[in-house]
Amino acid sequence: MTSPVPPAAVLALTESLSSEGLDPHALVVARHGEVVASHAWTPWAIDRPALSYSASKTFTSLAIGLLEAEGRLTLDASAGDLLGLPNPHGITVRHLLTMNTGHNMSQIESFDFDVAALLATPPAAAPGTAFAYNSDATYALSCIVTALTGEQLTDYLRPRLLDPLGIGRRWMTPVHGVDLGASGFHLTTDDLARLGIMLGDGGRFAGAQLVPASYIDELSRAWSDTRDPAQPDDPDNDWTYGYGYQVWRGREGFRVDGAYGQFAVVLPERGLVIAYQGATLDTQRTMRAFWRFAEAVDVADAAADADTAAGAQPGSVGASDAWDSRSALAPAPDGTMDATGARLDDTGGGWSLTLPPAVTGGAAQTFAVGAAGWTRTVLDLPAPADTAPAVVTVRPAETGTVVVVEARGEADADGILVHVVVATSPHRLIVRRSVDGDITVAWHTAPLRGGTLATVAVPAWVAA
């Protein structure tokens, strides 16, 4: 029987996420392998894939664990030997998994997903002795998967992990012709919940052992010390408890973790998984909301009387509108765009918005903005071309060709406010036309790999 997850605690969590300006998008809570509550904020949805950023890394780690189980690599194997590249500093698969290649942040920022440069550059510290967050290391792992299997990472995972988890067709952004691995996986919140349930049960899902329990045990350990020696210890900082095989340790349990708040928090001792997608620059506040929720579940667990035994019913669904929090959302410090050429015209019952090439990253785009609800438009806006050669040759990965936007606006005392949500990502643009007619455009949270709409383009089938 599922242990109680009090409805009041779920309600408090959703209200906290909404009221604190954290821009929540979707939430799924599971207990002992069963989904017990979910909530979505329109225009996002529980079952709509969106860019999960570094939550992608955990899938890459699991591919490595499966390859190890198949006897196709060892974690202490030379990354260079697996890729056919010079590896003078002895960087291993385990160094890549734990982000202990020894390179410092300045070196990492120079690599730009050049695996040969990653392996050839003398690290600032001996491999295995110093942690630095390193998406290039994860990309190297994706290249290793492809080199050993002749398949893109997502193709290799499909029959072994994704299908058994019930995760449907999903797209990962490629870099240099190879699935990025470090980011770019477009997942639903339900996908993240299924992943978390499997991780929390030692690699089992629906009665099947998908990933060896021994690998999940190793994956969830704190292999790397993530504390800043220049800073005092802070037990409230959820990023100081260590790093495993492409997951972060927490004050309890561990988590799948993507930029701006893409989470699957796994608390095995409580049998609890919190899957979440949102967009905030203060993800620690999101984590604090999760810990308050976990404490409320503890209170329910400790209660002895039968009245508390009825928790949220499996599959119970809540809904809100992201528009309700518009006044709490502000542009990011680095979010301002060049709005020269932008137009916002009244159409009677709504508006027509034109965004210039400096914002779109391609041709100017014009689309409708709803006044009483969100208006959806699919923009023909291909991602920037990537002409760099691939480290390994395989079936070409798909590139993005369209951008899905949902737009809504209102007139207020300061003019017209419009929010443009990129529905397949965490991101939204905040557009303001002043009473004098001046237009500003800014990201609420800016895309990480380039600041235009085109950088978050997806294949047309993802937008369907």
Image (cartoon, rainbow, N blue to C red):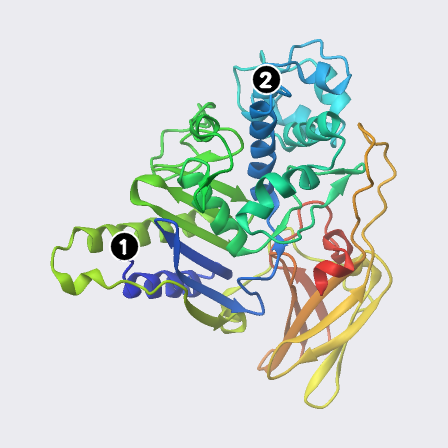
Give the vertical position of 263 relative to 71 (above or below): below
Q: Residue furthest front?
A: 207
Please, what secondary structure does the residue beneath circle 1 have? loop
In the figure, residue 221 lies in which quadrant?
top left
Q: Which of marks 1 and 2 is nearer the N terminus?
A: 1
Asked if residue 280 can be seen in this view, the reply is no
The residue at the point 70 percent across, 38 percent down is 180
Residue type at mark 2: give it.
Thr
Please, what secondary structure does the residue beneath circle 2 have? loop
Pick the residue in front: 442 or 63.
Answer: 63
Residue corresponding to mark 2: 74
**Disc number at residue 1?**
1
- Position of residue 103 measured from the top left corner of the image (x, y, whole percent): 62, 20
Asked if residue 86 can be seen in this view, the reply is yes
Residue type at mark 1: give it.
Met
Pick the residue in front: 153 or 102.
Answer: 153
Q: Residues within 10 Å of mark 2 (few under 14, many from 20)?
A: some
The residue at the point 84 percent across, 41 percent down is 386
Q: How many labels does the image show?
A: 2
